[in-house]
Image (spheres, rainbow, N blue to C red):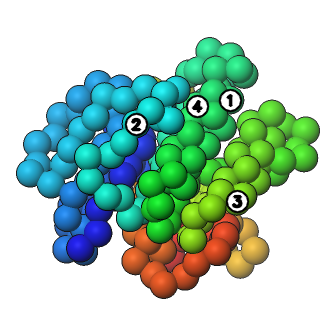
Amino acid sequence: MKNALIAGASGLVGTELLKLILEDKSYDKILLFVRKPIDIQHPRIVQVEQSLDRLSDFTPPFPINDVFCALGTTIKVAGSQEAFRKVDYDYVLEVGKLGERINAEKFLIVSAMGANATSSIFYNRVKGEMEKSASQLSIPGIFVFRPSLLMGKRKEYRAGEKFAQAVLGNLGFLFFGKLKQFKAISGTKVAEAMLKFAGSNETGFRVIESGEMNV
């Protein structure tokens, strides 16, 4: 049996991912990095209140096979571009470096549609730079998932996202063919795709676009 680590288990995708991993018989223990304990009790879950600034000093209490990273915020929620970059670039890479150090087999990351290291849009550029840096880690399998607009309930309120969900959530029938990539996608679909690749024999670096997940 395998063991998993999830960073960002309290977020939209992370919450769904945790549910699926608990249902997956191939996983024994699940280590969660949390800012404060989340309201879930299960004998297979170990919660660790761990600062992501100091992962170089952290040693997991058991071997980790698959490292899942569902960290992410917005510039508005973070408060500044610098604070946003700390979460969506620095923390993600710290989790990846931990995976590299403990000889994890796979690193699976939630990114975003439009990620591009050369983009003039700050958000997309940070996501693209994160992907580029993650691809250079010495982990056998590195998988990046780029969802379009995420559908589902978040613990934190994002007004712009709520509005977009209300408008685009009812227009899914318009997104087919080449437009399928832009169709809104549920957090559950992203989590299912992450678990699918975690269970595959595929190695190397691969980007999974929203349309591929949204089936």
Compare marks 2 and 1 and give the one earlier in the sequence: 2
Residue 128 can be seen in this image: yes
How far apart are labels 3 and 1 at the CA level?
18 Å
How far apart are labels 2 and 1 at the CA level?
22 Å
Which callout, 2 or 1, points to the residue nearer the camera?
2
The amino acid type of the residue labelled 3 equals Ser
How far apart are labels 1 and 4 at the CA level?
5 Å
The amino acid type of the residue labelled 2 equals Phe
Mark 2: give few (<14), some (14-19) or many (20+) Cα within 10 Å. Answer: few
The picture places residue 153, in percent across and down from the top left corner, at 37, 41
Residue at numbered disc 3: 135
Compare marks 2 and 4 and give the one earlier in the sequence: 2
The picture places residue 2, in percent across and down from the top left corner, at 29, 69
How far apart are labels 4 and 3 at the CA level?
18 Å
Q: Are marks 2 and 4 in contact (CB under 8 Å)?
A: no
168 over 200 or under it: above or below: above
Q: Are marks 1 and 4 in contact (CB under 8 Å)?
A: yes
| Viewer-closest of 121 and 45 | 45
